[in-house]
Image: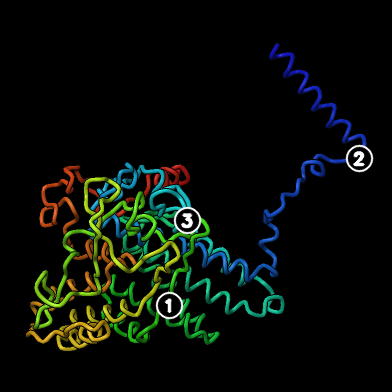
Amino acid sequence: MKMKARNRIAGAALFAASSLLLSGCSLDDILAVHVPGRVQESDLRSAALASVLATGVIAEVECSWNQYVAGASHHGDEYVPTSGNLTMRNWGQRKIYASDFGYAQATCGGWGYPMFTPLHTARYQAENVGERLASFPTDSVPDAPQLLASVATWGAFPLVAMGEGFCSMTINGGSEMTPAQVQDEAEQRFTNAISLAQAVGDQTLITQAYAGRARVRIAKGDFSGALADAAQVPDDFVVNVTRDDSESRRYNYYFERLNAPTGFRAHGSVADNYQNLTIGADGMPTEDDGVKDTRVNVKTDGTQAADFATILYYHDKYNSRSDPVPLVHWHEARMYEVEALAMQGDVAGALAKINHLREAAGLPTVTASVDAGDIMNLVKEERRRQLFVLGGHRLHDMLRFDIPFLGDPGSIHPDGFDQTGAEYGNLTCFQLPEVERKGNENVSG
């Protein structure tokens, strides 16, 4: 019976095809269905869509950055795990490995913190749109140089995340790259972005690109270069990743996943060693003994987190789905200067920059004697406080300064178990996904 049915269907298809041929029509005509709202590939080559394409790049960078920085914070030591959901608990317990589908293959707005695919989507879009913009006739897109500068500047930031938080990386199916190699690539892209932005005289893009390159140069240990770039970033300069509550890919993930002081969203609680931070009379960092350090303003109303076992502590930096997330912030630039000066042996210069930030925050300045042997310890602690839940910096600091992760000896949970007795994993940097590794092997084979 099944065979007869299949034969009837096949016969009908052949009859329809022969009828079309005899009537002068083609299958292409009848199968060419217009889907409203769908952009055709040919349309993307239209100069009329230049501005839309550039805006799309920014949107992809915003989404991928938002998810990366929140996930990096959850994975590091700024939060203890408090989720009642297995996936979110794994994020807080260092158990998101190379085989995890959500981490590796989920797209923007997905559950958890999709990272790999969104970052590469943003990177690829920037490259592809940049090529398209450069190919359009000058008279058809008068503002192409401006759009190209914007795409190049924003499109370099996914490389920052790839070079700081991942153990290794591949780009466009190429060979596996070390973090240092990714940072080299990021520096080149920021250098190109600076040139393009200078050519059109866009000071915001110029400064944004200098801030990005300063960050990369600090990661590479190019302290004189980082110092020069950071000096181009004035106080109060901020470029935000916009957020709103229209759909999940637009949510502020710091708030939605971690910092909401109510209900199911509380998948992490601000870690014990970020609570009650103070500054002593001599300006040195202390705990529970001095002026409250408002840069890490942690509070609680005594309610439990989503695990119904841990008292929830949260902060005041992100208070809704719509709160913007900084892409670059002048506080970062000043801290790059602090670190660069300290590493070059200029203790007085580093302290002056620290005190500048302290004064801006209304906090006591450092008056204690600090020598060359102590300055980097102070720099690391200032970074921990000044850059709290900002830009994924803490995860990178933990990796480059060999700071213990939660569950490791030297952390607040030194025996391998969290505050509820659940065991931590052993992940530090984010691994290259298995699907990416296997896919590249198949291509190269």
Q: Is residue 413 above or below residue 376?
A: above
Q: Residue 178, can we see it?
A: no
Quadrant including the C terminus: top left
Looking at the picture, tell me which residue is in the foreground, 167 or 237. 237
Residue identified by numbered label 2: 24
Q: Please tell me whether mark 3 sits on a helix, a strand or a loop.
A: loop
Query: What crowding class fits label 3: few (fewer than 14 Cα within 10 Å), some (14-19), or many (20 or more)?
Result: few
Above/below status of 303 relative to 425: below
Residue lying at 34% horizontally and 72% vertically, measured from the top left: 216
| Label 1 or label 2, whichever comes before in sequence order | 2
Applied colour scheme? rainbow
- Which residue is the site of mark 3? 172
Report the number of numbered marks: 3
Q: Position of residue 110 (x, y in %)?
A: 45, 50
Picture disc at residue 209: 1
Could you tell which of marks 2 and 3 lies nearer the N-terminus? 2
How far apart, in angstroms, are the residues tagged by discs 2 and 3? 44 Å
| Residue 391 x/y as whole percent | 34, 67
